[in-house]
Image: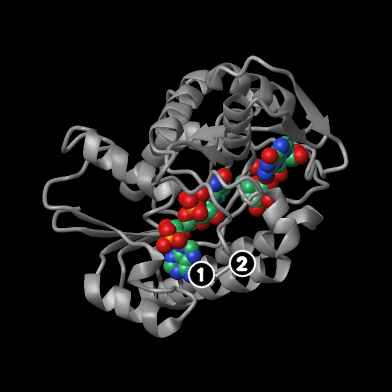
Amino acid sequence: MSKAVVLVTGGTGLVGQAIKHIIESEPEGSRFGKQPGESWIFASSSEGDLRDPSQSRRLFEKYKPTHVIHLAALVGGLFKNMKYKLTFLRDNILINDNVLHSSYESKVEKLISCLSTCVFPDKVEYPLDERKIHSGAPHESNFGYAHAKRLVDVQNHAYKEEFGCNFTSAIPTNVFGPHDNFDLEDSHVIPGLIHKCYLAKQNNTPFVVAGTGKPLRQFIFSWDLAKLFIWMLREYDDVEPVILSVGEDEEVSIRAVADAIVKAVGFQGDYTFDTKRADGQFRKPASNKKLLSLMGGFEFTPFDQALDITVDWFLKNYESARTGNANIA
Ligand code: NAP
Ligand code: GFB
């Protein structure tokens, strides 16, 4: 991919910054490093609000990307999704339609968009694999976001059949890492609990975990996910999506996550469960068999080690990190 220009939309977020970290720290020319002659652009919404087709077109005209990793989205955890179902549906449909059409108009050689394992049907035979995306309704807690994301798979097939576009998608499981959104209410569970546990330790106040702690999740460290995106960019050219996740046997309970966060933050107190708050989807065990068979294996960072890196980053960057309520723009 000499002289490639790789545009990462949503480049200033959790996943975008992880890709930036990997592409800049891996040796040039290596499997996950920058290739000679390649340039990478990590765009934020200040470069263009991608809900607006003219701003999307202007971004593509400015950078003339040959390849796009499309991460830009309205993103949030369970509670933010439950609050803003139409906004998640509409904003993400607008963003995705504009980025896919700008990619087509700019004759982008390859576009990888981002779904999420929460798009899978809630009532379905486990494990979840790439063939089951559309075989039932998603969990009601985030049906807006889930349908917007599922539509990208439909759009990819339509662009391929009508225009021969090389568009595909990745399906990451729950992600965490440096540069995450640590907002107390609107974030995902790991950054939200890290922030809550930190405040409990600092202020000697109760540490409260939402729900029952019983739901199960698979978590992927953002630096690992970044390597998988770079692999897809270089080595995967099929329209069908690929689940990017740790194995089904790596499911952990929310209680186990809270215990790991207490250890990583060094909190000495106890925590309680606020069972008045929702649990959301009980589990969404995704299979990474397709990924591993295509890649020939991959070494995921151990969860506790990834959590330590994330907590260290949070403590060092507390003043500048996303810790306040991110408004719905
Ligand atoms: P994030 O940290 O919230 O970052 C979102 C990025 O999108 C930011 O760079 C943001 O720019 C940009 N953005 C938001 N609205 C925009 C708009 N209207 N126009 C242009 N840019 C906009 O999210 P993330 O966790 O990195 O997620 C990246 C992708 O992974 C998303 O597609 C998400 O659906 C997917 N994903 C995430 C998870 C997870 O657990 N985090 C799991 C599965 C899939 P600003 O910084 O300027 O706001
Ligand atoms: O990461 P999370 O918000 O999203 O995890 P989902 C929610 C689970 O963690 C629920 C429990 O079982 C919550 O009860 N939990 C406990 C907490 N304490 C907290 C807390 O302080 N904050 C949060 N957020 N949860 C999301 C989808 O589902 O998965 C998104 O809604 C996205 O669309 C994301 O796809 C990857 O895993 O439940």
Look at the numbered disc 2 and give the secondary structure of its residue.
helix
Nearer-the-camera pick, 65 or 141: 141
Residue with the most extreme bottom position: 54
Is the Cβ of the residue at disc 2 closer than 8 Å to that at disc 1? yes
Look at the numbered disc 1 and give the secondary structure of its residue.
helix
Is residue 160 visible to the viewer in this orientation of the structure?
A: no
Look at label 2 and name its amino acid.
Leu
List x then y, in percent, for residue 177.
47, 36
The correct choice, above or below, for 273 with respect to 94 in the image is: above
Reading the image, the residue beneath label 2 is 151
In percent of the image, x 60 and y 47: which residue is there? 187
Task: Tell me if mark 1 has few (under 14), some (14-19) or many (20+) residues whose alpha carbon lies within 10 angstroms of its own.
Answer: many
Horizontal relation, residue 6 to residue 182: left or right: left
List x then y, in percent, for residue 238.
44, 54
**Quadrant where the image shows the C terminus:** bottom right
Q: Nearer the viewer, mark 2 or mark 1?
A: 1
Quarter of the figure with residue 259 = top right
Nearer-the-camera pick, 40 or 235: 40
Reading the image, the residue beneath label 1 is 96
In percent of the image, x 51 and y 69: which residue is there? 96
In percent of the image, x 76 and y 51: which residue is there? 121
In percent of the image, x 63 and y 45: which residue is there? 184
Horizontal relation, residue 69 to residue 91: left or right: left
Q: CA distance from mark 2 to mark 1?
A: 9 Å
Is residue 323 visible to the viewer in this orientation of the structure?
A: yes
Nearer-the-camera pick, 192 or 306: 192
Q: Which mark is residue 79?
A: none
Look at label 1 and name its amino acid.
Asn
List x then y, in percent, for residue 104.
38, 75
Q: Is the distance from the Cβ of mark 2 to the nearest ligand 1 atom less than 8 Å? A: no
The correct choice, above or below, for 27 with respect to 115 in the image is: above
Q: Is the distance from the Cβ of mark 1 to the nearest ligand 1 atom less than 8 Å? A: no
